[in-house]
Amino acid sequence: MHDPGRSTVAEVPANYSPQRGKGRAVLAWIAFLITLAILLTLGTWQVQRLHWKEQFLAEIAERHVATPVTLGDIEAMAAKGEDIEYRPVTVTGVFANNKERHFFATWQGKTGYYIYTPLQLADGRFLFVNRGFVPFEAKEPEMRKQGQLTGEQTITGLARARLAEKPSSIVPDNDLSKNIFYWKDLDTMASSTGIPADKVVPVFVDAGNALNPKGLPIGAVTQFDLPNNHLQYAVTWYGLAAALVGVALYALFRRKGDRPAS
């Protein structure tokens, strides 16, 4: 039963300290502002990345249909720090078929290998050319003898930059004993064939769609479907920021509503 002599106003705890309450409120607001700043920064960064990726994809689309340049042009661009990725190039030389390296890959749902064969140039250097894809059962050269091109060849394809390091810790180590590469380590690809480091051109070339005898290797395997999820990420971060503001406003108004009347 209600005691008529007892106040209905919420009682203040005996150990309540106004200063302590204000201190907690200040810390809560500081944490709120820091978190909000982080979320907004991440969202803005993703917007910037989105603009960069869209520009990069547009440049790639223009590059791979441009007029092919010489290998000398590509090397000059690389020496100046310019981006050489996906730029059309034409090279001439003789394939060292006995030194080909096999890069584990999938192509149109099939498991197999990209065949990287050194192309010996007129100046004595070697350029590793990704001639294309062969299915798993055609890994060994004996299974595709007609595709082992001999004599001087002119290849038109796309320049590709070398990798400075393994792209991820989850990528397996290259298996030299089985001649299976899981990442394009140019130095190791060259040294495992006995080619001196000073005789290696420091770029790759992906061969184009010129047909090889018996159809192997299958050329033009360069993939351009680069992921572009930055808009989705930006919306996520901005959405979290908006939700955080909503929670803060709700807490603020509720605090005001629960404050006892004077």
Image: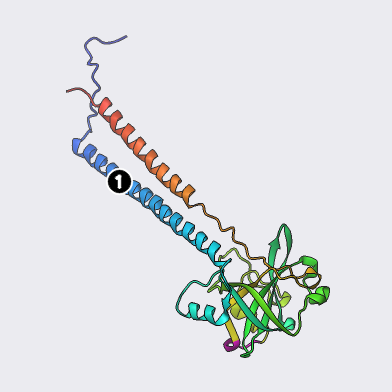
The magenta stretch spans residue 24: no
Foreground: 84 or 117? 84
Residue 55, horizontal then vertical, whole percent: 47, 59
Q: Which quadrant of the figure has residue 117?
A: bottom right
Where 89 falls versus 258 (above or below)? below
Q: Nearer the viewer, residue 43 or 94?
A: 94
Given the image, on which type of amino acid does mark 1 rest?
Answer: Leu
Q: Position of residue 148 (x, y in %)?
A: 77, 78
Bounds of the magenta span?
195-199
| In front of the other: 142 or 120 | 120
- Tell me the residue at 67%/87% (across/down): 194
**Residue under the image location 56 percent in, 71 percent down:** 87
Give the answer, above or below, for where 52 lies relative to 180. Answer: above
- Horizontal arrangement in the rendering, residue 209 relative to residue 161 (left or right): right
Q: Position of residue 214 (x, y in %)?
A: 81, 70
Residue at position x 58%, y 82% in the image: 201
Q: Main secondary structure of the magenta part?
A: helix
Where residue 72 sits: x, y (%)?
54, 82
Please tell me which residue is depicted at 40% across the width and 50% down the height of the picture: 43
Quadrant assignment, res 241 = top left
CA neighbours of label 1 inside 10 A, class few (<14), some (14 to 19), many (20+) = some
